[in-house]
Amino acid sequence: MSAGLIDLHTHTTHSDGSDAPGELVEAASLNGARAIAITDHDTVGAFPEARSAAERFGVEFVPGIEISAEFASGTMHILGYCVDEASPGFQDKLDKLKEAREERNPRIAERLQSLGVDVGYDEVAQLSGNEVVGRPHFARMMVEKGYVASIQEAFDRFLKKGAPAYVEKARLSPGDSIALIHGAKGVAVLAHPYQLKLSSAEQADVLVAELAELGLDGIEAIYSRHSSAERALYAELARRHQLLVSGGSDYHGTYKPDISIVRGLGDLEVHYELLAAIKDRAANRANSVRVFQVEHVFHAAELDND
Ligand code: AMP
Ligand code: ZN
Ligand code: FE
Ligand code: FE
């Protein structure tokens, strides 16, 4: 049985969403989800609450993560699915990414101040809940203080890449982002490829080939803000490069008020089959790691006998 809608891209209050994990899982269940992934930026803090809510609501929980990778022109995010948060070194690496945010964030506040927008970093951090502070929290504070009418206006006028209060943060390379996810036994998927701002299908093909070479497992072809042409293009690219297809809404609650969980802008349909293939890939990866470890033990035992 593989019917059922799912959503493999959502954010909670642990990063820049407005729903607590339990609320988000409940909202997914109300919208008919059979499975739900939480993919907060740089944190797995939502997992314990999400797991118990998922059990309560009879929804399958998929532990996920979203990592921002270095990419010159547009925005490259890599999603990780079925990550094991107890993997050695995983939390430490996520902590490093949070530190990179803490370097950047006060500088965004300084830029805003110099532009006449009186928003302080401390108040933004407080509003965010203090775990992972992101640009949407700055945007929310700017709305609350009346500098802009919407979060989108805050991004368009101040916070988006190239806008006057945009400040770079240290990121992992695409290869290291994929390795971070694989190191946690996860499946690495290129998020919302339209945000790469590539100029042609040929360019997309070259980039996907490079990422596949680095170990990328899949592409988020089905995405709220992808047109049907984009969904078809990226699904075809995945097929050509023997990658999995993924899909999700990128639900952020009130931070992206036009996007509903599971249904995106209204026409989103992500089916359970895609998750089944992702879980197979993760299970095969975990098995090959186990075989490798068993072989290691075996060799060590042989050496002891020598
Ligand atoms: P950060 O990780 O703090 O740099 O913030 C990235 C988040 O800000 C993304 O995941 C989106 O939720 C949001 N975001 C980035 N660019 C835009 C944009 N142009 N318009 C609206 N939201 C955006
Ligand atoms: Zn976000
Ligand atoms: Fe993203
Ligand atoms: Fe996201």
Image (cartoon, rainbow, N blue to C red):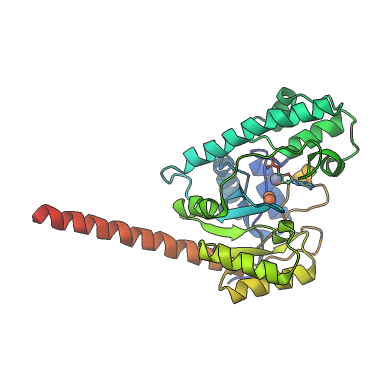
The answer to whether any part of residue 143 appears in the image is: yes
Residue 45 falls in which quadrant of the image? top right
Q: Position of residue 12 (x, y in %)?
A: 67, 43
Residue nearest the viewer, comparing 156 with 143? 156
The answer to whether any part of residue 58 appears in the image is: no
Taking the image as shown, residue 2 lies to the left or right of residue 19, namely: left
Residue nearest the viewer, comparing 235 with 2? 235
Q: Residue at x 43, y 42 (%)?
A: 89
Residue 233 falls in which quadrant of the image? bottom right
Q: Residue at x 64, y 43 (%)?
A: 21
How many circles with numbers are drawn on the protein?
0
Taking the image as shown, residue 70 lies to the left or right of residue 285, namely: right
Image quarter where the C terminus lies is bottom left
Q: Position of residue 131 (x, y in %)?
A: 62, 33
Q: Position of residue 299 (x, y in %)?
A: 20, 58
Image quarter where the N terminus lies is bottom right
Q: Residue at x 71, y 53 (%)?
A: 73
